[in-house]
Amino acid sequence: MADISLHYSSKAPLAGTYTAFANVLQLWRQRNHDRQELAKLDTRSLRDLGLTESAARFEINKPFWRE
């Protein structure tokens, strides 16, 4: 009798790990870049975006891993 399983068993249990890790690194890089760009804006540009200087400073000072 044939052994038939209805459950998928991956031969590579860490197959998506690299992709997930690369996605997280890319997100962190993007956050860091965006915060550096935000730090370059003057008061008028911040006001155009609807941000106060204190709100921008708060965002700029966050670590890259925090949303």
Image (cartoon, rainbow, N blue to C red):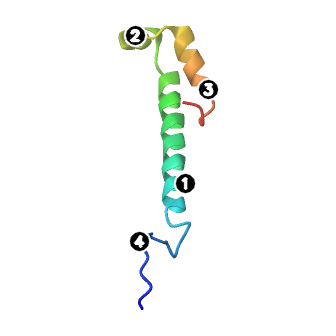
Placement of the C terminus among the 4 image quadrants: top right
Upstream in the sequence, badge 3 or badge 4?
4
- Which amino acid type is marked by label 2? Gly
User: Disc 4 vs disc 1: which is toward the camera?
Assistant: 4
In front of the other: 3 or 42: 3
Q: Which mark is residue 37?
A: none
Q: State how far apart marks 1 and 3 are (Cα).
A: 21 Å
Looking at the image, which residue is at 52% across and 28% down?
A: 35
In front of the other: 32 or 20: 20
The residue pinned by badge 3 equals 62
The residue pinned by badge 4 equals 6
The residue pinned by badge 1 equals 21
- Which amino acid type is marked by label 3? Lys
Upstream in the sequence, badge 1 or badge 3?
1
- Which amino acid type is marked by label 1? Phe
Upstream in the sequence, badge 1 or badge 2?
1
Categorize mark 4 by other alpha carbons within 10 Å: few (<14), some (14-19), many (20+). Answer: few
Pointer 4 and pointer 1: residues touching (CB < 8 Å)?
no
Q: Position of residue 41 (x, y in %)?
A: 46, 19
> 12 above or below 16?
below
User: Disc 3 vs disc 4: which is toward the camera?
Assistant: 4
Q: State how far apart marks 4 and 1 are (Cα).
A: 30 Å
Q: Quadrant of residue 45?
A: top left
Q: Position of residue 37 (x, y in %)?
A: 47, 28
Q: State how far apart marks 3 and 4 are (Cα).
A: 47 Å
Looking at the image, which residue is at 59% across and 35% down?
A: 64
Placement of the N terminus among the 4 image quadrants: bottom left
